[in-house]
Amino acid sequence: MIRLAREDGLWIVTFDRADKANALTGDMLGELAEIAEAAQDGARALILTGAGRVFSAGADLEAARAGLATSPLWERLSGALAALPIVTVAALNGTVAGGAMGMVLACDLRIAAQGAGAFYPVMRLGFRPQPSDPARLAALVGPSRAKMILLAGQKITTDEALAWGLFDRVVPGEALMESARALLADSLSASPGHVAALKAMCGGGAPRATR
Protein backbone atom coordinates (compact mmCIF):
# COMPACT_ATOMS: atom_id res chain seq x y z
CA MET A 1 0.00 0.00 0.00
CA ILE A 2 3.11 2.18 -0.07
CA ARG A 3 4.74 2.33 -3.50
CA LEU A 4 8.33 3.52 -3.88
CA ALA A 5 9.71 4.36 -7.32
CA ARG A 6 13.36 5.26 -7.78
CA GLU A 7 14.30 7.29 -10.85
CA ASP A 8 17.96 8.35 -11.07
CA GLY A 9 18.11 9.61 -7.51
CA LEU A 10 14.50 10.83 -7.34
CA TRP A 11 12.37 8.80 -4.93
CA ILE A 12 8.60 8.98 -5.46
CA VAL A 13 6.58 7.65 -2.51
CA THR A 14 2.90 7.02 -3.20
CA PHE A 15 0.18 6.11 -0.73
CA ASP A 16 -1.83 3.53 -2.63
CA ARG A 17 -4.99 2.94 -0.63
CA ALA A 18 -7.36 5.12 -2.58
CA ASP A 19 -10.45 3.14 -1.59
CA LYS A 20 -9.79 4.18 2.03
CA ALA A 21 -8.80 7.80 1.26
CA ASN A 22 -5.17 6.72 1.74
CA ALA A 23 -5.73 6.37 5.49
CA LEU A 24 -2.56 5.01 7.05
CA THR A 25 -2.23 1.82 9.04
CA GLY A 26 0.56 1.19 11.54
CA ASP A 27 2.44 -0.94 9.01
CA MET A 28 2.18 1.77 6.36
CA LEU A 29 3.36 4.45 8.78
CA GLY A 30 6.33 2.32 9.86
CA GLU A 31 7.25 1.68 6.23
CA LEU A 32 7.10 5.41 5.49
CA ALA A 33 9.40 6.18 8.41
CA GLU A 34 11.89 3.55 7.20
CA ILE A 35 11.83 4.99 3.68
CA ALA A 36 12.42 8.52 4.97
CA GLU A 37 15.36 7.31 7.04
CA ALA A 38 16.82 5.31 4.14
CA ALA A 39 16.57 8.39 1.92
CA GLN A 40 19.28 10.01 4.06
CA ASP A 41 21.88 8.09 2.08
CA GLY A 42 19.92 6.74 -0.86
CA ALA A 43 18.00 9.62 -2.46
CA ARG A 44 18.83 12.93 -4.11
CA ALA A 45 15.26 14.25 -4.02
CA LEU A 46 11.93 12.95 -2.77
CA ILE A 47 8.25 13.39 -3.63
CA LEU A 48 5.35 12.31 -1.41
CA THR A 49 1.99 11.87 -3.12
CA GLY A 50 -1.19 9.81 -3.02
CA ALA A 51 -3.26 7.71 -5.38
CA GLY A 52 -6.83 8.72 -6.13
CA ARG A 53 -8.51 11.94 -5.05
CA VAL A 54 -7.26 12.33 -1.46
CA PHE A 55 -3.63 12.77 -0.38
CA SER A 56 -4.28 11.08 2.97
CA ALA A 57 -7.01 11.11 5.58
CA GLY A 58 -4.43 10.49 8.31
CA ALA A 59 -4.71 7.46 10.56
CA ASP A 60 -6.95 4.59 9.59
CA LEU A 61 -10.01 4.75 11.87
CA GLU A 62 -9.62 1.29 13.39
CA ALA A 63 -5.87 1.76 13.80
CA ALA A 64 -6.46 5.16 15.42
CA ARG A 65 -8.81 3.61 17.95
CA ALA A 66 -6.12 1.04 18.70
CA GLY A 67 -3.57 3.76 19.48
CA LEU A 68 -2.05 4.76 16.15
CA ALA A 69 -3.31 8.34 16.47
CA THR A 70 -0.83 8.95 19.30
CA SER A 71 1.98 6.72 18.03
CA PRO A 72 5.54 8.12 18.07
CA LEU A 73 5.86 6.85 14.49
CA TRP A 74 4.26 10.07 13.23
CA GLU A 75 6.96 12.22 14.80
CA ARG A 76 9.66 9.76 13.72
CA LEU A 77 8.47 10.14 10.12
CA SER A 78 8.19 13.92 10.10
CA GLY A 79 11.52 14.25 11.91
CA ALA A 80 13.25 12.02 9.37
CA LEU A 81 11.80 14.03 6.49
CA ALA A 82 12.78 17.36 8.02
CA ALA A 83 16.34 16.14 8.62
CA LEU A 84 16.94 15.08 5.02
CA PRO A 85 19.69 17.07 3.27
CA ILE A 86 17.77 16.83 -0.03
CA VAL A 87 14.80 18.72 -1.42
CA THR A 88 11.46 17.14 -0.50
CA VAL A 89 8.12 17.93 -2.11
CA ALA A 90 4.62 17.05 -0.93
CA ALA A 91 2.58 16.70 -4.12
CA LEU A 92 -0.96 16.94 -2.80
CA ASN A 93 -3.27 15.16 -5.23
CA GLY A 94 -6.13 15.99 -2.87
CA THR A 95 -6.95 17.01 0.68
CA VAL A 96 -4.55 16.27 3.52
CA ALA A 97 -6.11 15.59 6.92
CA GLY A 98 -5.22 14.55 10.45
CA GLY A 99 -1.82 13.10 11.22
CA ALA A 100 -0.80 13.20 7.56
CA MET A 101 -0.38 16.95 8.01
CA GLY A 102 2.86 16.29 9.89
CA MET A 103 4.74 14.80 6.94
CA VAL A 104 3.42 17.54 4.65
CA LEU A 105 4.62 20.27 7.02
CA ALA A 106 8.02 18.56 7.26
CA CYS A 107 8.58 18.72 3.49
CA ASP A 108 10.44 21.63 1.94
CA LEU A 109 7.77 22.46 -0.65
CA ARG A 110 4.05 21.81 -0.97
CA ILE A 111 2.41 21.78 -4.38
CA ALA A 112 -1.30 21.00 -4.56
CA ALA A 113 -3.85 20.02 -7.15
CA GLN A 114 -6.73 22.47 -7.52
CA GLY A 115 -9.42 21.46 -5.04
CA ALA A 116 -7.06 20.11 -2.39
CA GLY A 117 -7.57 21.36 1.14
CA ALA A 118 -6.23 20.82 4.65
CA PHE A 119 -7.90 19.73 7.88
CA TYR A 120 -6.31 18.83 11.24
CA PRO A 121 -9.20 18.04 13.66
CA VAL A 122 -7.17 17.40 16.80
CA MET A 123 -9.43 19.57 18.96
CA ARG A 124 -12.58 17.75 17.89
CA LEU A 125 -11.04 14.29 18.24
CA GLY A 126 -9.35 14.96 21.57
CA PHE A 127 -5.80 14.22 20.42
CA ARG A 128 -2.76 16.45 20.57
CA PRO A 129 -0.92 17.15 17.33
CA GLN A 130 2.51 15.69 16.74
CA PRO A 131 5.00 17.65 18.90
CA SER A 132 6.72 19.45 16.03
CA ASP A 133 3.60 20.24 14.00
CA PRO A 134 2.33 23.44 15.68
CA ALA A 135 5.68 25.20 15.34
CA ARG A 136 6.11 24.12 11.71
CA LEU A 137 2.54 25.16 10.93
CA ALA A 138 2.92 28.54 12.62
CA ALA A 139 6.20 29.14 10.77
CA LEU A 140 4.33 28.74 7.49
CA VAL A 141 1.01 30.47 8.14
CA GLY A 142 1.54 32.50 11.32
CA PRO A 143 0.30 31.88 14.87
CA SER A 144 -3.28 33.10 14.37
CA ARG A 145 -3.91 30.99 11.29
CA ALA A 146 -2.28 27.99 12.95
CA LYS A 147 -4.85 28.44 15.72
CA MET A 148 -7.62 28.58 13.13
CA ILE A 149 -6.53 25.13 11.96
CA LEU A 150 -5.63 23.51 15.28
CA LEU A 151 -7.90 25.21 17.82
CA ALA A 152 -10.91 26.14 15.71
CA GLY A 153 -10.69 23.01 13.57
CA GLN A 154 -11.32 24.91 10.35
CA LYS A 155 -11.18 23.16 6.99
CA ILE A 156 -8.85 25.19 4.81
CA THR A 157 -9.70 25.54 1.13
CA THR A 158 -7.21 25.48 -1.74
CA ASP A 159 -7.30 29.24 -2.15
CA GLU A 160 -6.93 29.89 1.57
CA ALA A 161 -4.02 27.43 1.85
CA LEU A 162 -2.24 29.14 -1.04
CA ALA A 163 -2.87 32.65 0.29
CA TRP A 164 -1.77 31.67 3.82
CA GLY A 165 1.46 30.03 2.65
CA LEU A 166 0.49 26.49 3.59
CA PHE A 167 0.60 25.56 -0.11
CA ASP A 168 3.40 26.99 -2.22
CA ARG A 169 1.76 26.43 -5.59
CA VAL A 170 -1.56 25.17 -6.94
CA VAL A 171 -1.83 23.50 -10.34
CA PRO A 172 -4.42 21.52 -12.29
CA GLY A 173 -4.55 17.94 -11.08
CA GLU A 174 -3.29 16.50 -14.35
CA ALA A 175 -0.18 18.69 -14.13
CA LEU A 176 0.66 17.85 -10.51
CA MET A 177 3.47 15.34 -10.91
CA GLU A 178 5.04 17.11 -13.86
CA SER A 179 5.07 20.32 -11.81
CA ALA A 180 6.52 18.54 -8.78
CA ARG A 181 9.31 17.08 -10.89
CA ALA A 182 10.04 20.51 -12.34
CA LEU A 183 10.58 21.91 -8.84
CA LEU A 184 13.34 19.32 -8.33
CA ALA A 185 15.14 19.71 -11.66
CA ASP A 186 17.80 22.12 -10.39
CA SER A 187 18.58 20.16 -7.23
CA LEU A 188 18.81 16.87 -9.13
CA SER A 189 21.36 18.41 -11.48
CA ALA A 190 23.46 19.89 -8.64
CA SER A 191 25.93 18.09 -6.42
CA PRO A 192 24.48 16.59 -3.21
CA GLY A 193 26.83 18.69 -1.09
CA HIS A 194 25.68 21.90 -2.75
CA VAL A 195 22.01 20.99 -2.27
CA ALA A 196 22.57 20.14 1.38
CA ALA A 197 24.48 23.35 2.07
CA LEU A 198 21.83 25.57 0.47
CA LYS A 199 19.04 23.76 2.30
CA ALA A 200 20.86 24.21 5.60
CA MET A 201 21.24 27.92 4.89
CA CYS A 202 17.44 28.10 4.51
CA GLY A 203 16.99 26.37 7.85
CA GLY A 204 16.49 22.75 6.92
CA GLY A 205 18.43 19.50 6.89
CA ALA A 206 22.14 19.47 7.54
CA PRO A 207 25.18 19.84 5.28
CA ARG A 208 26.84 16.65 4.11
CA ALA A 209 29.83 15.74 2.04
CA THR A 210 29.29 14.90 -1.62
CA ARG A 211 28.91 11.17 -2.09
Image (spheres, rainbow, N blue to C red):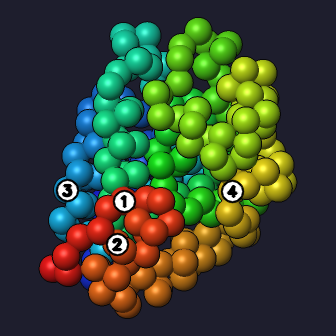
- Residue density around tag 4, few if under 14, some if 14–19, many if 20 or more, within 10 Å: many
Q: Amino acid at mark 4?
A: Phe
Residue 28 versus residue 51 in the image, above or below = above
Q: Amino acid at mark 1?
A: Gly
Q: Kindly report the distance in space between the C-alpha atoms of the residues bearing marks 3 and 4.
A: 26 Å
The residue where tag 1 is placed is 205
Q: Secondary structure at mark 4?
A: loop
Residue 139 in sight from this viewpoint: yes
The residue where tag 2 is placed is 196
* Quadrant showing the N terminus: top left
| Percent of width and height locating residue 101 | 55, 39
The residue where tag 3 is placed is 38
Residue 80 versus residue 204 in the image, above or below = above
N-terminal label among 3 and 4: 3
N-terminal label among 4 and 2: 4
Circles 1 and 2, Cβ within 8 Å, touching? The answer is yes
Residue 120 versus residue 8 in the image, above or below = above
Q: Kindly report the distance in space between the C-alpha atoms of the residues bearing marks 4 and 2.
A: 23 Å
The residue where tag 4 is placed is 167
Residue found at x 62% / y 63%: 111
N-terminal label among 4 and 1: 4
Front residue of this view, candidates 23 and 105 = 105
